[in-house]
Image: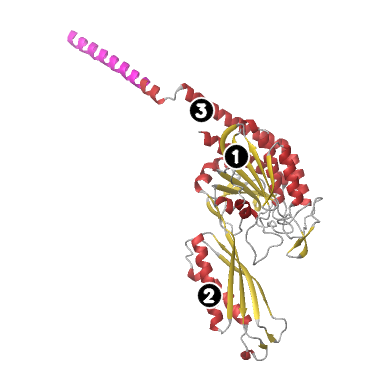
Amino acid sequence: MAAQQTHRSRTSTRATLSAGLSALSLAAGLLCLAPAPAAAAAAQAQATGSESLQAQIETRAKAVEAQLIAWRRDIHQHPELGNYEVRTARLVADHLRKLGMEVTTGVAKTGVVGVLKGGKPGPVVALRADMDAIPVKERVDVPFASKAKGQYLGKEVDVMHACGHDTHVAILMATAEVLAGMKDQLPGTVKFIFQPAEESPADFEPNGSNMWGAKQMVAEGVLDNPKVDAIFGLHVTSNIESGKLGWRSGPAMAAADQFWIDVKGRQTHGARPWGGIDPIVVASQIVLGLQTIQSRQVDAMLEPSVITVGTIHGGNRMNIVPEKVEMMGTIRTYDQGMKKDIHARMKRTTEAIAASAGAEADFKVLELYDATINQPALTEKMAPTLKRVAGDGNWMITPKATASEDFSFYQAKVPGLFFNLGVTPKGTDVNKAPSNHSPEFYVDEAALVNGVRALAGLTVDYMTMAQR
């Protein structure tokens, strides 16, 4: 019995010593794994600072909301066509100067750029808004409806902000006010880009230069001095309910190209078509032939594409086979290689069909905008910000859009994220709401402050993450 007790005592002692050593080892390990007090304090301070900036954005965005709506209504009532945004540019420049920014005007004709230098070093974030309206006669019954006129392609037209660019300008002006109020705490620099002619110039020449809007601003160095690290932009849309946010990674909007086809036949009497070469029949065959490119020639599993003939003009009398037919249309693609391949196939199809009838065809294409592609890494990084701003159930991953945007020219140079803000009143069927570019396009102004919260939030969060 005594021997057994002594054995138990020794065993107990060893167990106690072992447990003590284990505890010491665990404590030492935890000390090794734990951050140094200074590092932990710095991380906590950074997190607290980020939360503080976010809280300020909420407060400041709410405070500027009434002015935001007032700006939007003023700009909506005074729309200006591409490259003629003189009044709008002056309004923007005066506001940015009042906020103490370095302001450059006359960029790409009427563009305005403001630079806000934060109180701490950090990355350069660019925010972009487009300023131009389009030739549409407004049919929305609001007190600030547009009654403006303008010159478009040499003709007098009604002008309206039917695409929502008035809201883009007002949102970015309000964002500038929010961030300027936090200037000393910003760890970086913000470049505010107010761009003309996103929809193309009012005096667009089919055979002229294709340099305007974003492409021209990039060419004039808007992403340099200081060099931009990332750029963010938004577009209001009728396809999403008011206040909700939508985006997608990768190709989000299509590239847009314009094409012209001239078919030359031989004029003759309509009662004797065999006496000439009928360009109307040839043009009809070309229209049908072009549709087989998407359905039977290109890889439908790669990306979708669209070829649309929008105009056909030929002839002036019912009993005359004309000499010439002119057609014009648009091409929409998402992949650069696929786009070039479609151009080549369209030229070959057009010329071969014309030659088969003894006619001649001239195919020309003008590349307008590249595909808008949200860089996957940046989109993944900033998606939590957009989700936080929108709130649960108020954000979505949107499908690809066949509309196009020249924001793509910024994204070709620096990482960029372009997202949508819904403006269709809640309770309205978004599938039946008048679309952008409609004379009845309507904006629920309650949604606009979410655009300010999103742009300011993206800016601050990107800067903060860059400090980690």
Label at residue 43 = 3
Q: Amino acid at mark 3?
A: Ala
Where disc 3 sits, the SS reads helix
Q: How many marks?
A: 3
Can the viewer see residue 65 in this picture?
Answer: yes
Q: Amino acid at mark 2?
A: Thr
Q: Is residue 106 above or below residue 183?
A: below
Q: Quadrant of residue 133?
A: bottom right
Q: Position of residue 377 (x, y in %)?
A: 49, 45
Q: Amino acid at mark 1?
A: Thr
What separation in Å lies between label 1 and label 2 (alpha carbons)? 48 Å
Q: Is residue 221 above or below residue 190?
A: below
Where disc 1 sits, the SS reads helix
Q: Position of residue 338 (x, y in %)?
A: 50, 63
Residue at the (23%, 14%) spot, across then down = 11
What separation in Å lies between label 3 and label 1 (alpha carbons)? 20 Å
The residue wearing badge 2 is 349
Label at residue 7 = none
Label at residue 459 = 1
Q: Is residue 422 above or below residue 356?
A: above
Residue at the (57%, 52%) spot, across then down = 398
Q: Position of residue 329 (x, y in %)?
A: 62, 68
Q: Earlier in the sequence, mark 1 or mark 2?
A: 2
Where disc 2 sits, the SS reads helix
234 or 11: nearer the viewer: 234
Residue at the (66%, 86%) spot, across then down = 267
154 or 158: nearer the viewer: 154
Determine whether label 1 and label 2 are within 8 Å by CB: no
Query: Most prominent secondary structure in the magenta stretch?
Result: helix
Residues in magenta, as a range:
1-27
